[in-house]
Image (tube, rainbow, N blue to C red):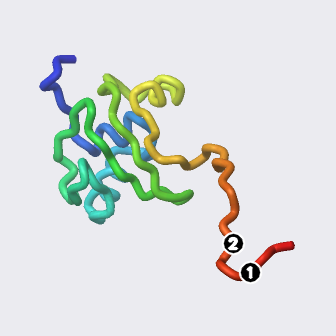
């Protein structure tokens, strides 16, 4: 697809398998909890392009993704995962970090 190509957000959410159907995606968008490039959206016809960042409230937590390429269809899950990149650390192992002690207290 050309660089100026876009896809309606309801179709994108369905094609990327974040929504089970396009009508469910339309309802989800209409609730107003999804953000596109930091902007709250409420219209299912909102255009999404490659490089756009989406914040999606899912049952398991909030996910932040960037659209790597626009899918042409609702294909297998593996094909859908190749169209976006996760930007949040959900599902990633926690980073090792030193514990910070409050002043005057010792854990020993």
Q: What element carries label 2?
A: loop
- As drawn, the residue found furthest toward the front would be 104
Q: Mark 2 points at which residue?
A: 101
Residue shown at the point (28%, 55%) measured from the top left: 35
Q: Is residue 43 above or below residue 107?
A: above
Residue shown at the point (69%, 63%) measured from the top left: 99
Which of the 4 quarters of the picture holds residue 43?
A: bottom left
Quadrant including the C terminus? bottom right
Which of the 4 quarters of the picture holds residue 71?
A: top left
Query: Is there a contact, CB below 8 Å, between mark 2 and mark 1?
Result: yes
Image coordinates of residue 32 in percent, x first then y, are 27, 64
Image coordinates of residue 34 in percent, x first then y, are 31, 57
Q: Is mark 1 on a helix, strand or loop?
A: loop
* Nearer-the-camera pick, 104 or 47: 104
Q: Find the distance from the CA under tag 2 to the CA under tag 1.
A: 7 Å
Q: In this view, does 69 lie above or below 59?
A: above
Residue shown at the point (61%, 46%) measured from the top left: 91
34 lies left or right of 88: left
Q: Is residue 40 above or below residue 70?
A: below
**Crowding at mark 1 (Cα within 10 Å: few <14, some 14-19, many 20+):** few
Residue shown at the point (52%, 30%) measured from the top left: 77
* Nearer-the-camera pick, 33 or 87: 87
Quadrant including the N terminus? top left
Image coordinates of residue 23 in percent, x first then y, are 32, 50
* Nearer-the-camera pick, 102 or 95: 102
Image coordinates of residue 82 in percent, x first then y, are 45, 25
Q: Mark 1 points at which residue?
A: 105
Which numbered circle lies on residue 27? none
């Amino acid at each position: 697809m050309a660089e100026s190509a876009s896809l309606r957000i309801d179709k994108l959410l369905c094609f990327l398998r974040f929504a089970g159907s396009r009508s469910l995606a339309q309802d989800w968008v209409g609730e107003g909890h999804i953000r596109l490039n930091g902007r709250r959206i409420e219209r299912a016809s909102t255009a999404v392009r490659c490089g756009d960042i989406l914040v999606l409230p899912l049952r398991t937590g909030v996910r932040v993704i960037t659209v790597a390429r626009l899918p042409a269809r609702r294909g297998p899950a593996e094909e859908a995962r190749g169209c976006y990149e996760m930007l949040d650390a959900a599902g990633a192992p926690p980073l090792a970090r030193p514990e910070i002690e409050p002043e005057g207290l010792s854990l020993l």
